[in-house]
Amino acid sequence: MRLPIVLALFLVTFAYGQKGTNSPFSYYGLGEKRFEGNTENALMGGVNAYVDSTRVDVRNPASLAKLTRTTFSLATSYDIRKMQTSASSYQERTFLLDYLNLSFPIYKNLGVSVGLRPYTSVGYRLMSHESISGREQYYSYEGSGGVNQAYLAAGYEVLKGLRIGVSGGFNFGKTQWQNLYSSPSFLYISREDSESLYRGGSYALGVQYERELTKDLSLSVGLSYIPEARLRSTNNLTLYSLRPASGNFLVKDSRNITDPNLVKTNLTLPSSLDFSAGVGDQERWFAGASFGYSNMSAFSNPFVTSSFVGYENAYRFSVGGFYLPHNTVYTKYWKRVTYRAGLYYEHTGIIVKEKPINDFGITFGVSLPVQGLSNATIGAAWGKRGDGSVLKENYLTLKVALTLNDKWFQRTKYH
């Protein structure tokens, strides 16, 4: 791996104009919260206890202190979702860019990472109709966009086995909404176009401890904390009157109806705390668990409100691990493949019509050696969210990640 190759990969994959989801649940909050860890850990249920010297998971920036090689990581997903209500069902497919980052050790026991990843994604299209006083009313709701994060993180080992870390992120993005209202008895169609531009910063703190229990068994524990943050939002709301004409719409009238008090608002991003622990033989197998808690009840967005949506504190529990049959270059290829599996349960903290939205899933996959310590990871997550009383969503997410490792910033020794 050389610098021109890495820069080319950055340019080719800098595609964050993507539609990051196709889920009706992204209607709520800032959108669907994206998984912030690496694909390897995602395929272990999201467990964040294992610390690797050649892979990066900046959910706990303290892990960067163990880096021994420069690492470039790129991950994508292909998302298949089937949505069901009491009246209908439909399916959506979406290609996603999950993250890209460049990480490297710059001094003994000190590692740094810089990268880009989605924080939330909005992508939905909903249609409904009702009869009011004998008149048919039709509604269409569509949203797209989300929030991305560019980050810089560092981790340092202060004592043998004890690592600390910090990361800072710049959050940015845009979300657009379009709502249409029509009726056969109306001459014109009403359309509301809303837009929010987001800017803001956040940071995270982490600590990890790793200790050998026996010659072939070690313990890893970690704790990370993200304080509450603010996201500045610049908002606009425009109302249009449209007239159907030859399969298109002609704008009859438009006016900006943004409330002067809501042109600029501050959103509250809730704090979160994550704890993880696990045991294993670092070269052969590992099993662990993670628990995360988020103060979701503190979330607020003055510009976008709903009478039937509420928020309460959220939590997530996951278990998982990996198994590596044999870790030498002299054995058969498939014995050098790492097998991963896990499961998770999440109470999202979103309440729709007094019903909580929960998420459950199982994960599985493999990491395939490519060259040296580089590898390609492929796998899937299958899960379901919500229930049929409001909305039920079944999903299958296929994941692919590429991790390239090389030695940088090391002196050449001459003998």
Image: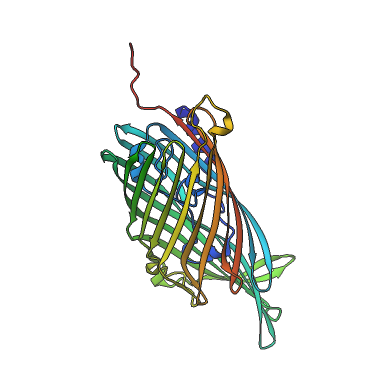
Q: Is residue 233 above or below residue 139?
A: above
Q: How is the image coloured?
A: rainbow
Residue at 48% in and 28% down = 1
Task: Kindly tell me whether residue 400 is visible in this rendering.
Answer: no
Q: Quadrant of residue 210?
A: top left
Residue at 44% in and 69% down = 303
Which quadrant is home to the C terminus? Answer: top left
User: Residue farthest to the bottom?
Assistant: 133
Q: Nearer the viewer, residue 301 or 413?
A: 413
Q: Nearer the viewer, residue 214 or 16?
A: 214
Counting every numbered tag in the picture gives 0
Q: Position of residue 57 (x, y in %)?
A: 42, 45
Q: Is residue 136 above or below residue 41?
A: below
Q: Position of residue 300 (x, y in %)?
A: 40, 68
Q: Nearer the viewer, residue 139 or 339?
A: 339
Q: Position of residue 47 (x, y in %)?
A: 44, 50
Q: Position of residue 108 (x, y in %)?
A: 29, 32
Residue at 33% in and 42% down = 213
Q: Is residue 84 left or right of residue 4?
A: right
User: Residue farthest to the front?
Assistant: 214
User: Residue farthest to the right?
Assistant: 246
User: Residue farthest to the top?
Assistant: 415
Q: Is residue 198 above or below residue 305?
A: above
